[in-house]
Image (cartoon, grey):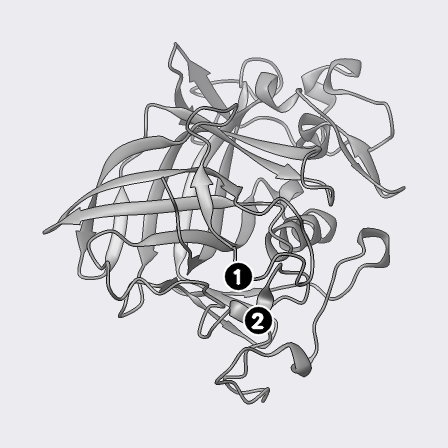
Amino acid sequence: MRTTTILLPVLAALALGACGDDDMPPGTDGGVDGGISCPATAPGRGEMLPPCCYRVSNADRLDAPELRMAAFIISEPASLSDAVVTAVLANALDSEHFNWLLRAEITGTDASITTGFGVRSCPAMGGDSCPGDSTFAFDTAGDYPPVTFAGSLDGETLSAPRLDQAFTVPIFEEDGSTVLLTLPLNNMQLARALLSEDRTCVGARRGRNYMTDGEISAFITVEAAKVGRLVVGTTLDTTLCGLIRGETTPGVTCDDAPQSEWTHQPDALCEGTPATCTQDPGDGSLCDASTTCNAWFVQATFAAQGVEITN
């Protein structure tokens, strides 16, 4: 199933960048039907090409395509699908402060998939501040190492069963070094990633909208979500846990109220090390949302674009 993902218009409180037709990459006409308007806030955006604003084609490395997420839209939990969160994610992806990479090494119908945080080769962010050097690398020796797991290729669709590993992808502020928010993901499942003919795109960009041909699910535990704060001007000042539970009052944390009073209560149970997470079927037979459920089920669609991963 293909999902139309709409990037939100400018939100003044978030300074979400938009771009006009003069920012179009080569080969586009700027029209409503098929025109692509690549992100104005992307560093070296003149390098980007349709149909997904990719930087590097995978046509000559079909057995090892390298991609960066270009759109990431969360549908569950509902508290992470609101306009403010969607805008924060879209802005961070467009400006390349949120870099989530994926590489697949394909042999026949088998695929070894590596995914996780990507370090951008040029630390300067925004506009054309570092044109010609837009490569990325997995954070193999840093705080956010990638994970590698077995998947499969059916036609041109990559997929993988639920992992028994956890990994974290950070989102940075405009300075490129201060962490704005982290996504601590447990037991991710790659439900699908439909690759384009040259395996350079998952989905496509039309105007300022993305068609997302990828889908993942995962779990975020309550404890992991309590770490760090998300501060966006005067709009938000909370932890990821507070954001998911539905409490954005400045200074109020998840520990300030019992779980039974949360607007969006956990709906899954994670147990063991490494954690094994399971979503409650909705009847409380696995865990009680008010007391014993300790994680939220996360579902999202995504688009991705070809990049160069140097390690």
Q: Would you identify the image quadrant in which residue 274 lies?
A: top left
Residue 104 visible somewhere in the drawing: yes
Q: Is residue 282 visible?
A: no
Three-letter code, disc 1: Gly
State which quarter of the image contains the N terminus.
bottom left
Counting from the top left corner in percent of width and height, residue 282 is at 48, 31
Q: Residue at x 49, y 68 (%)?
A: 53
Q: Which residue was labeled with disc 2? A: 46
Please tell me whether mark 2 sits on a helix, a strand or a loop: helix
Q: At x 74% / y 14%, what residue is drawn? A: 255
Residue 43 vs residue 249: left or right? left
Label of residue 230 in the image: none
Return the x and y of residue 256 as percentages of the image width and height.
Answer: 80, 15
Q: Label 2 amino acid?
A: Gly
Who's the residue at 66% across and 52% down the image? 86
Rendering coords of residue 212 (x, y %): 45, 62
Element type where label 1 sits in the image: loop
Crowd class of label 2 (few under 14; some 14 to 19; many from 20; radius 10 Å): many
Residue designated by label 1 = 132
Q: Which residue occupies the extreme right position in the image?
A: 234
Q: Residue furthest top?
A: 272
